C-alpha cells in the first residue's frame, strides 16, 4: 500500500468534526475578475482597509473563465474556502 | 441661417459653382495640423480623446483639476443599471493616461486661442503641481505627514483632506499635488515635512507655473458643469440645517470610497438615517433665484439614489417630492417602476419650506397631497436634487475660445449641427452644450471627434510618432530563466513586508535565475535596472512584485519588450494594494502572504510562452443600413473622413421618417435641411446609394465584411452602421380614423401648413397615446415636444384659438422647458390625467366632447373640442427582429437594439465592427439622432482608419484537433467568435475574441485555452499557494 493509498483509505469513513482552535483562520483562494473584483481588492488597499491576510487572489480575465477543476483542485489541496467574485 | 452655419462648420460649400473655393480648400486640407486639443477630461473629453488618438491623431487632453475624471468620478453608481461609476470610468482614465497618442496636461487652462480651423495656436497656462509626476509613486506617505487639513472639495465639504493630496483614491495621474493656497511652506516658508518623508524625491518646491503654446488643427470643448448652489434658496435650509444635503453630497455618502466608506451617515449626529426625502427641481425649472431649464438627469438620479439607499439599508423609507417625472430615456420608465415597486414613495408636490426640530435635528416637510389635504411629515435627512449650470466662468471661457453662447451661457449650437460651435474647427460635447446624462455626453464626445476627424482627415498620422522596437528574441527550447524583482515602493511595501526575505525565498523557486529588490521598480532608473538584468542574467521571463497589474503591467511589458522579450513573458505580483496596504498591522503575516503571492506568480510565469499577435487587414469602407437622417448623417461623416460608404435604403427615396416633419420645436426648417443633406449624399463620390433594396446576407468579421444585397450588388466593407430607424405608431385609440378632425401631431403639422386655425376653435391634445402602457410601456420622448411645437404654432397664428393639452408628465427636458413656459404664457392649458382614468371622447356633430377627471380642479370636467390631436409615439422598425437575427445583436424588451454598454458604449454593439444610431436604438428627436449618428460614424471611423487590426494577445486559442464540436462555446460566447466552418465543425475567429475565457470554462474537451490564463498556469498557481498546507 502506497502512502497515497493510505490517505485515500482514511477518507472512507465519515469525517469526524474536530474542535476548531481559537486562532484558526480559514484559508481562502479568491478567483477574481480582472475588471471588477480584482479592482475592488486593489481599492481596498488604496483605502487602507484591513482584512485577514489568509485570502490569496488569483486573477482571471473574467469569472466566466473559472473552471470546475480549479475549485476541485483548491479543495483537494486543502483550502477551506473558495471565493469567486466578478 | 442655422443651416448655412451647419454647412459652414462641416467645411462644405453649398454653392456648387464655387469650384475655386473648393480647390483652395483642397490645398488647405493638406496643411491642417493632425492634432486636436480636448479641453476637459471628464467622460466626454476622454471619449473624444480616445477616439481621436485611436485613429491616428495626436491629442492634447487638458484638465484644470489635478486628476482627470470629471463629474462621473464623483458618482457612486449610475442609472438605470446600478453599475459602479468608478469601475466604469477607471479603465478609461488609465487608458487615457497610457495612450501613446494622448498628452495629458493637468492643472492647466487655455488662456489664448489664435488662428483658424485646421491651424490653431493655443496658449496653455499650467499651474505648478510641486510634485514630480514621473517620480511620485502614489504611496501617500506625504499625506500622512502633512499637518494642514483643508476642506475636501471632491467630497463636497463632507470631510477634510491634506494640503498635499490626490483628488480621489483612484486619481489619474496617480500622483499627489500640493495645494499652494494652504501648504505651510508655500504660504509661510516653514514645514517641508512631505519632502523629508518622500523616498522617491518627488517633492519639488522649486516648481513654477508654466505657459506654453500648442499647435492643433481642431479643438473640442468638454469643460463640464457646475451644480446649482441651493444655499440661495434659504427656505430649504441648505447650509443652515445640518441634515439637508445636496444630491452630489449624497453620492459621496453612498460611495464606498467616500467620506464614510459607503455607510450613509447623518451629518448632525453620525447616525443612520431611516426616513429620507428627495426634493426635485432644486435650482431647475424656476426662473426666480434659480435656473429656468430642466436639468434632465435629476428625476433619474433621485430614483437611483433611493434604490441604492434602500439596498444599503432595507429599513430606509424613501420619499421623492416631484413636479413631473421626466423619465424620457431608454428604459427609464422601467427604472422608475422598479423604484416604486421597491417601496419608494412618489409624491407630486412642490415643497416650499423645510423646518428643523431643534432637539432631534429631524426635518419637517409640509406638502399638499393629491386630494388637496395638508400633510406634515418628519424626515431624518433631506436630499436636494440640484440641477446643472454652465461651467464656472462660462462667459470668460467662451470668450477665450471665441465662441458664441446661448442666453444662459451654454455653448451655442444649432439643433441641426449639435456639436459644432459658432467658430469653425471648434466643437463641443457634454453638459457645456446643455444639460444631459452620461451616455449623451459620451455620444457627443464621439460625435465631436468624428467632426474633427472629418476636418483633419488628410493630416491623420502626421503628428504621432511610431515606436521602433528591436526584434523579439526567440526563446523556444530554452529552460525558464525567471527574474524576480521585488519592489520596496519606498516604505509602502518594504515598511510592512520584508522584501529581502521575499526575494530570497523567490530565488530558490524552480526556474528562478535571479531575484533581487529594487527601491522603485517603476521609476526610470528602476526600469533601466530591469532591462540591464534581462541582458546580464539572460532572463527569459520576468516577475515584478510591486503594485497592481491593472495600472502597471503595461509599463513593465513595454520595458521588457524594449530589450527583445515578448510582452507576455511577464507577470506582476500585486503585493502592495493586495498585501502591504491591507496588512500593515501584521508584518509577519504580510510577509508570508507576499511570499505566497510572488511564488504563485513565479509558478505561473515558468509556464508562460510568447504570444504572437496576429493582425488582419481592414477594408476602408462602411455599410450603412437605413437611409433616414441617421444613416445619411453617418454616411456623410464617414465620407468626409475619407472612407467609402454603401448606403442601403429599402424605400425608393432617402429621408425616412424625417420626410414627414416640417419644423422642429426650435423652428428650424427641417425640410430644407433634409433636402440639403439628401443632395450632399447623392453628390458625394465616396457614397454609393442602394435604393429599393435590403441586405440579403453579410458574412465576415470586423474589418473584413462581405455583403450581398437583394438586388444582387455585392461589396466588401470594414464596418457596419445599423441606422434602420423606427416606425410611427398608428393609433387605434380615441376613434382615430373615424373623423378628419382626429389627427396625430404629425398630421396636425401638415394640416397647419395648409389651413388656418380660426378664432374660437378648440384643439384638445391627448399625450401618451399608445405609449407608457402595455404593450409599448415606454416613453416615446418626442411627443411632448411635438405637442409644444404645434400648440405654440396654433397660438402664435391664432391667439383666439384654444389649445388644451391633456398629459401625464410633460417631458420638456433640458432647454425645451423654455417652450413649455412659452406655451403656457401663450395661454395653452395643460391638464393632468392619470392612466387609470383616461380622457373619454364622444363625437358631437363635427366636434367632440372630451371628459376628464380634473386633477387640478378636483372634479370631472368636459371640454368641447373641434379638433382632437393624438400624440402618438414611436415603435421599433418592423424588420428589427430580422436584422437582430442576421447580425446577432440583441434587442431590449421593447424591441429596440441593445448597445454594448448603456453608459459608456452607447453607439457600439458588443460585436466588433458594428455600430448603432438613431431610432433603431431608442426613440429620440432630430438633434439627438444627429449627435448619435456622428458618434457612430466617429466610432466606425476609428476602426476604418487602421490599415490592420492587431489581435489582442489575451485571447482564447482553439485546438481543433481535440474539439468535439459540441457547440457549448458557440452558444456561450457573447462575441460570436466560435463559428461553424465549411467542414461543419467549430472553428474560432480570433479577431472577434475578447479573451474572457467563457469558452474555456465551458468546453468539456478543454479545446480552448486562454493565453496567459491557461489551465496549467492557473493550476500551477493553486498548487503553489497550497504547497505548505
Image: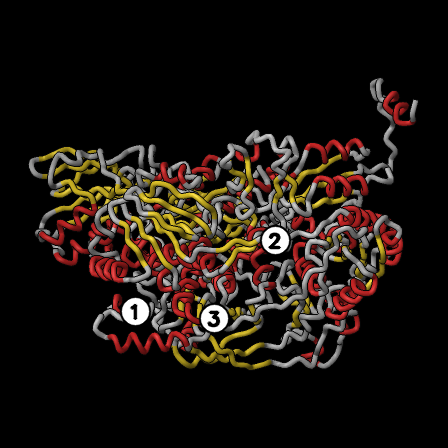
**As drawn, B1029 above or below B434:** above
Q: Quadrant of residue B450?
A: bottom left
Point 63% across, 49% down: residue: B954
Q: Toward the viewer: B211 or B758?
A: B211
**Left or right placement of residue B384 versus residue B735 in this view:** right
Q: Nearer the viewer, residue B486 or B848?
A: B486
Pair 3/2: label in front: 2
From the top left corner, tell me how far across and down residue B479 is, in percent.
81, 51
Q: Chain of mark 3?
A: B
- Identify the chain of the residue marked 1, using the numbered disc in the image: B
Circle nearer the viewer, 1 or 2: 2
How far apart, in angstroms, are the residues tagged by discs 3 and 2? 30 Å
Does B787 sit left or right of B392 as displayed? left
Tell me, yes or no, if residue B667 can be seen here.
no
Which residue is denoted by mark 1 in the rendering? B12
Which of the two marks, 3 or 1, is nearer to us in this view? 1
The secondary structure type at the circle numbered 3 is strand
Q: Residue at label 2?
A: B613
> Residue B464 at what x, y percent from top left?
54, 70
* Left or right of residue B689, residue B865 in this image: left
Please give the label number shown on residue B36: 3
Q: Residues within 10 Å of mark 1 (few under 14, many from 20)?
A: some
**Looking at the figure, which quarter contains the C terminus of chain B?**
top right
For marks 3 and 1, the one nearer the N-term is 1
Which is more toward the observer, A84 or B753? A84
Amino acid at each position: 500500500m502506497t502512502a497515497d493509498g493510505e490517505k485515500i483509505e482514511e477518507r472512507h469513513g465519515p469525517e469526524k468534526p474536530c474542535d476548531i482552535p481559537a486562532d484558526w483562520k480559514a484559508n481562502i483562494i479568491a478567483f477574481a475578475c480582472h475588471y471588477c473584483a480584482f479592482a475592488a481588492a486593489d481599492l481596498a488597499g488604496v483605502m487602507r482597509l484591513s482584512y485577514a491576510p489568509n485570502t490569496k487572489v488569483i486573477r482571471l480575465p473574467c469569472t466566466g473563465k473559472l473552471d470546475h477543476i480549479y475549485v476541485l483542485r483548491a479543495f483537494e489541496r486543502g483550502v477551506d474556502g473558495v471565493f469567486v467574485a466578478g | 441661417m442655422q443651416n448655412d452655419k451647419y454647412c459652414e462648420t462641416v467645411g462644405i460649400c453649398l454653392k456648387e459653382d464655387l469650384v475655386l473655393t473648393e480647390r483652395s480648400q483642397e490645398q488647405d486640407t493638406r496643411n491642417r495640423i493632425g492634432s486636436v486639443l480636448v479641453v476637459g477630461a471628464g467622460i466626454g473629453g476622454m471619449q473624444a480623446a480616445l477616439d481621436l488618438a485611436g485613429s491616428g491623431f495626436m491629442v492634447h487632453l487638458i484638465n484644470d483639476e489635478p486628476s482627470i475624471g470629471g463629474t462621473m468620478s464623483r458618482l457612486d453608481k449610475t442609472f438605470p443599471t446600478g453599475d459602479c461609476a468608478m469601475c466604469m470610468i477607471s479603465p478609461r482614465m488609465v487608458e487615457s493616461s497610457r495612450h501613446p497618442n494622448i498628452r495629458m496636461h493637468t492643472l492647466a487652462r487655455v488662456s489664448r486661442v489664435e488662428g483658424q480651423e485646421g491651424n490653431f495656436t493655443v496658449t496653455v497656462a499650467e499651474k505648478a503641481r510641486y510634485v514630480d509626476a514621473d517620480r511620485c509613486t502614489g504611496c501617500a506617505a506625504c499625506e500622512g505627514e502633512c499637518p494642514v487639513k483643508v476642506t475636501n472639495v471632491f467630497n463636497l465639504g463632507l470631510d477634510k483632506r491634506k494640503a498635499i493630496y490626490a483628488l480621489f483614491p483612484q486619481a489619474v495621474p496617480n500622483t499627489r499635488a500640493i495645494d499652494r493656497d494652504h501648504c505651510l511652506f508655500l504660504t509661510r516658508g516653514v514645514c517641508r515635512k512631505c519632502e523629508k518623508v518622500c523616498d522617491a524625491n518627488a517633492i519639488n518646491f522649486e516648481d513654477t507655473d508654466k505657459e506654453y503654446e500648442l499647435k492643433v488643427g481642431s479643438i473640442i470643448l468638454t469643460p463640464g458643469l457646475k451644480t446649482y448652489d441651493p444655499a440661495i434658496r434659504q427656505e430649504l435650509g441648505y447650509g443652515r440645517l445640518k441634515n439637508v444635503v445636496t444630491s452630489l453630497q449624497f453620492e459621496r455618502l453612498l460611495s464606498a470610497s467616500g467620506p464614510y466608506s459607503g455607510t450613509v451617515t447623518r451629518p448632525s449626529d453620525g447616525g443612520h438615517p431611516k426616513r429620507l426625502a428627495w426634493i426635485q427641481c432644486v435650482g431647475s425649472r424656476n426662473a426666480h433665484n434659480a435656473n429656468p431649464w430642466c436639468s434632465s438627469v435629476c428625476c433619474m438620479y433621485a430614483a437611483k439614489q433611493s434604490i441604492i439607499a434602500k439596498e444599503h439599508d432595507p429599513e430606509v423609507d424613501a420619499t421623492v417630492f416631484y413636479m413631473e417625472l421626466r423619465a424620457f430615456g431608454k428604459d427609464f420608465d422601467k427604472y422608475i417602476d422598479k423604484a416604486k415597486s421597491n417601496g419608494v414613495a412618489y409624491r407630486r408636490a412642490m415643497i416650499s419650506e423645510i423646518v428643523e426640530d431643534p432637539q432631534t435635528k429631524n426635518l419637517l416637510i409640509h406638502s399638499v397631497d393629491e386630494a388637496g389635504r395638508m400633510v406634515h411629515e418628519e424626515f431624518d435627512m433631506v436630499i436636494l436634487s440640484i440641477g446643472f449650470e454652465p461651467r464656472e466662468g462660462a462667459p470668460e471661457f467662451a470668450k477665450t475660445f471665441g465662441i458664441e453662447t446661448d442666453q444662459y451661457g451654454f455653448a451655442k449650437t444649432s439643433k441641426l449641427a449639435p456639436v459644432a460651435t459658432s467658430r469653425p474647427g471648434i466643437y463641443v460635447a457634454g453638459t457645456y452644450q446643455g444639460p444631459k446624462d452620461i451616455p449623451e455626453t459620451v455620444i457627443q464626445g464621439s460625435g465631436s471627434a468624428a467632426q474633427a476627424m472629418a476636418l483633419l482627415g488628410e493630416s491623420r498620422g502626421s503628428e504621432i510618432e511610431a515606436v521602433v522596437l528591436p526584434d523579439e528574441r526567440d526563446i523556444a527550447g530554452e529552460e525558464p530563466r525567471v527574474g524576480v524583482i521585488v519592489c520596496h515602493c519606498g516604505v509602502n511595501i518594504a515598511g510592512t513586508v520584508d522584501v529581502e526575505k521575499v526575494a530570497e525565498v523567490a530565488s530558490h523557486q524552480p526556474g528562478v535565475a535571479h531575484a533581487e529588490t529594487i527601491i522603485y521598480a517603476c521609476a526610470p532608473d528602476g526600469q533601466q535596472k530591469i532591462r540591464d538584468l534581462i541582458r546580464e542574467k539572460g532572463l527569459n521571463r520576468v516577475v515584478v512584485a510591486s503594485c497592481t497589474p491593472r495600472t502597471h503591467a503595461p509599463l513593465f511589458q513595454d520595458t521588457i519588450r524594449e530589450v527583445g522579450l515578448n510582452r507576455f513573458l511577464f507577470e506582476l505580483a500585486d503585493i502592495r494594494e493586495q498585501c502591504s496596504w491591507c496588512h500593515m498591522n501584521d508584518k509577519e503575516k504580510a510577509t508570508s502572504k507576499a511570499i505566497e503571492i510572488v511564488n504563485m506568480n513565479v509558478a505561473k510565469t515558468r509556464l508562460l510562452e510568447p504570444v504572437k499577435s496576429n493582425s488582419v487587414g481592414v477594408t476602408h469602407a462602411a455599410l450603412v443600413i437605413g437611409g433616414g437622417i441617421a444613416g445619411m448623417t453617418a454616411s456623410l461623416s464617414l465620407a468626409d473622413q475619407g472612407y467609402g460608404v454603401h448606403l442601403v435604403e429599402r424605400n425608393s427615396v432617402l429621408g425616412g421618417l424625417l420626410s414627414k416633419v416640417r419644423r422642429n420645436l426650435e423652428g428650424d426648417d427641417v425640410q430644407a435641411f433634409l433636402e440639403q443633406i439628401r443632395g450632399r449624399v447623392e453628390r458625394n463620390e465616396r457614397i454609393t446609394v442602394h435604393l429599393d433594396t435590403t441586405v440579403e446576407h453579410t458574412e465576415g468579421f470586423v474589418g473584413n465584411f462581405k455583403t450581398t444585397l437583394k438586388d444582387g450588388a455585392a461589396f466588401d466593407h470594414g464596418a457596419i452602421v445599423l441606422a434602420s430607424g423606427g416606425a410611427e405608431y398608428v393609433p387605434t385609440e380615441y376613434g382615430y380614423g373615424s373623423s378628419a378632425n382626429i389627427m396625430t401631431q404629425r398630421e396636425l403639422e401638415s394640416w397647419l401648413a395648409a389651413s388656418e386655425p380660426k378664432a374660437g376653435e378648440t384643439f384638445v391634445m391627448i399625450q401618451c397615446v399608445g405609449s407608457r402602457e402595455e404593450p409599448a410601456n415606454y416613453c416615446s420622448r418626442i411627443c411632448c415636444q411635438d405637442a409644444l411645437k404645434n400648440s405654440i404654432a396654433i397660438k402664435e397664428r391664432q391667439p383666439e384659438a384654444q389649445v388644451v393639452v391633456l398629459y401625464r408628465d410633460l417631458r420638456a427636458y433640458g432647454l425645451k422647458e423654455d417652450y413649455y413656459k412659452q406655451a403656457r404664457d401663450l395661454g395653452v392649458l395643460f391638464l393632468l390625467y392619470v392612466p387609470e382614468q383616461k380622457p373619454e371622447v364622444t363625437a358631437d356633430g363635427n366636434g367632440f366632447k372630451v371628459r376628464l377627471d380634473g386633477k387640478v380642479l378636483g372634479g370631472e370636467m368636459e371640454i368641447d373640442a373641434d379638433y382632437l390631436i393624438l400624440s402618438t409615439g414611436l415603435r421599433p422598425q418592423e424588420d428589427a427582429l430580422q436584422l437582430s437575427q442576421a447580425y446577432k445583436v440583441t434587442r431590449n424588451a421593447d424591441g429596440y437594439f441593445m448597445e454594448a454598454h448603456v453608459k459608456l458604449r452607447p453607439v457600439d454593439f458588443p460585436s466588433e465592427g458594428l455600430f448603432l444610431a438613431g431610432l433603431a436604438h431608442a426613440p429620440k428627436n432630430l438633434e439627438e439622432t444627429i449627435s448619435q449618428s456622428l458618434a457612430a460614424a466617429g466610432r466606425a471611423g476609428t476602426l476604418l482608419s487602421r490599415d490592420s487590426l492587431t489581435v489582442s494577445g489575451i485571447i482564447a486559442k482553439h485546438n481543433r484537433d481535440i474539439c468535439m464540436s459540441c457547440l457549448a462555446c458557440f452558444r456561450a460566447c457573447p462575441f460570436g467568435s466560435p463559428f461553424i466552418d465549411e467542414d461543419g465543425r467549430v472553428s474560432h475567429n480570433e479577431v472577434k475574441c475578447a479573451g474572457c475565457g467563457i469558452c474555456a470554462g465551458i468546453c468539456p474537451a478543454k479545446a480552448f485555452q486562454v493565453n496567459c490564463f491557461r489551465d496549467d498556469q492557473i493550476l500551477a498557481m493553486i498548487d503553489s499557494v497550497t504547497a505548505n498546507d
